[in-house]
Image (cartoon, rainbow, N blue to C red):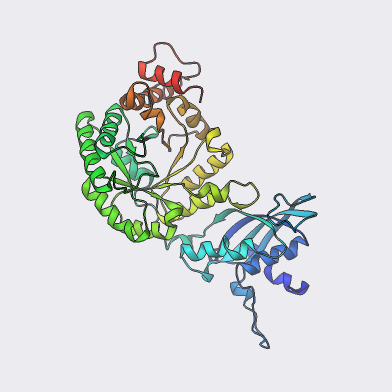
Amino acid sequence: MQPNDVRGFFADWASLDAEDYLLLEYYFECSGEPELAAAHLCSEQSTAQWKRVGIDEDYRPQFAAKVIDLKITAHLPEPSYSLQPEVRGAMTACQVRIAHPHRNFGPRLPNLISAVLGEGAFFAPGIPIVKLLDIHFPPSFLSAFQGPQFGIDGLRQLLKVYDRPIFFGVIKPNIGLAPAPFAELAHQAWCGGLDIAKDDEMLADPDWSPLAERAQLLGRARVAAEQATGVPKLYLANITDEVDQLTRLHDAAVANGANAVLVNALPVGLSAVRMLRRHATVPLIAHFPFIAAATRLPCYGVHSRVFTRLQRLAGFDAIIMPGFGPRMMTSEAEVLDNIAACLDPNFGDIKPSLPVPGGSDSAATLEHVYHTIGHVNFGFVPGRGVFGHPHGPRGGAASLQQAWAVLATGQSLNPPPADLPAELAAALQTFGSH
C-alpha cells in the first residue's frame, strides 16, 4: 500500500451513518508505522483492491472498513508471542476502533465471522499479533435476527422462578451411565430443588445412551418430580451433532420428554444454531467447547465476549460460559464482561440471554458468585456440587436452595450461621475448600 493510499481507510465517525457499520475493537502489535498497519487491517478485511487497473474508480468510500480511532498503548521490545520466529524486534502495541460496512456481507453470521475473524484480520501485513476485543451492532443489523425465543423472562415463566438464580445441575457420572440410572439421579435432584437437570456437553447420542431413550426416561422422571414438588422442571438434552442431524434430534428429544436442548455452539457453528432457532419449540442453551482455544491468550485471538454476543444473536436463550474460580482459568473481569454481553440493553429488540457462568460450583460457591454478579439474573450450574454431594443428588440440590435461603436474608455463609440444615452443612464441609 502506498503512503497516499492510507488515508482512504480512515474516517471521522461523525461523518458516517452509524446504521451502516459494525464497530470493531482490536488490539494489535505492529512492526512498522501504526497508521499503515491499521490501514492494512481494514483493507485486508474489506476491499483490499479498491479499483480496477486503468479505470478511475474507488470502492473505499462505500465498501472499505475504516479506522475511526487509533491509540498507541505501548512500545514493546519484542512481540508478545513468538508466533512467527522470523518476526523479531521492537513492536508498537495499539488499540483501534474500526467501522466495518455490513453491506459487505449482510446479516449472515458465517460471512460476518469470515470478515472480522478471518484471513484479513490475522494475516494483515505488519501485524503478527492481533485480537478482536469486541463487536457492536447497529439496530439496522440486529433487526434481521430473531435472537432468543424465550430469553430470561421466558425461562423464568416456564420454571415459575422469579426472585433467585436458576439452579442447573450437570448429571454425573456424565459418560458411561445407562439411561435408567441416569434418569433416577435427575429425579432425585429435581425433588431436592433443582430447576434444570442437564446432559453433560460431551454426552450426545451414543449407542449406550441413545438420546430418544434417555429423553423418554428423563421426561417421565421430570413429570414425576413436578407432581411430587408442585413446581415445573426442565430436562436439558444435549443434541450436539452433525448439522444435518440437529432438527431431527431436537424433534426426537422433545417428542420423548425433553423440554430444553443443549448445543455446543462453536463445534456445530453459529449458522447451524440460527437455523435450529427457527425450528425449535423449546429453549436453546449454549455450551462453550472450543471457545477457550480461541480466547485464552490475552493479546491474540478473540475475546470471549465476542462469541457471547454472537451466540445471543444466533438465538440462545441461555449461554453457559467459563465461570469464576481458578479451574476455569478465566479472569473475574472477563466473566463479568460475558455476563454483561448477555444482558446488554443496547441490543435492539433482541431479548437478553440468561448468563450461566460455570465451573466447579456448589452451595459453597453460590455466595461469591451472587455477590460478584450483583443480581439474581444468572444460572448456577454445579455438577459434582449436586451429584457428588455426600447426601446424594437430592441433598446436593437441597443445599443450593438452603444456601440461597440464607443469602436472601442478607446473611453470609462465611462464617456459616449456627444450626444449618444438614445438607448445606455437608456441602460447605465437602466443597468449601474448592
Most foreground residue, 398 or 214: 214
Does the image show residue 63? yes
> Taking 228 as reference, is 256 above or below it?
below
- Which corner quadrant of the image does residue 275 belong to? bottom left
Residue sitting at x 28%, y 38%: 178
Q: Residue 95: x, y in percent?
A: 69, 54
Residue sitting at x 43%, y 23%: 407
Tell me how many marks there are.
Answer: 0
Most foreground residue, 160 or 239: 239
The answer to whether residue 59 is left or right of residue 73 is left
Q: Residue 424: x, y in percent?
A: 39, 20
Q: Residue 344: x, y in percent?
A: 49, 48
Query: Quick one: quadrant of the N terminus?
Result: bottom right
Residue sitting at x 48%, y 22%: 432
Most foreground residue, 208 or 337: 208
The answer to whether residue 346 is left or right of residue 83 is left
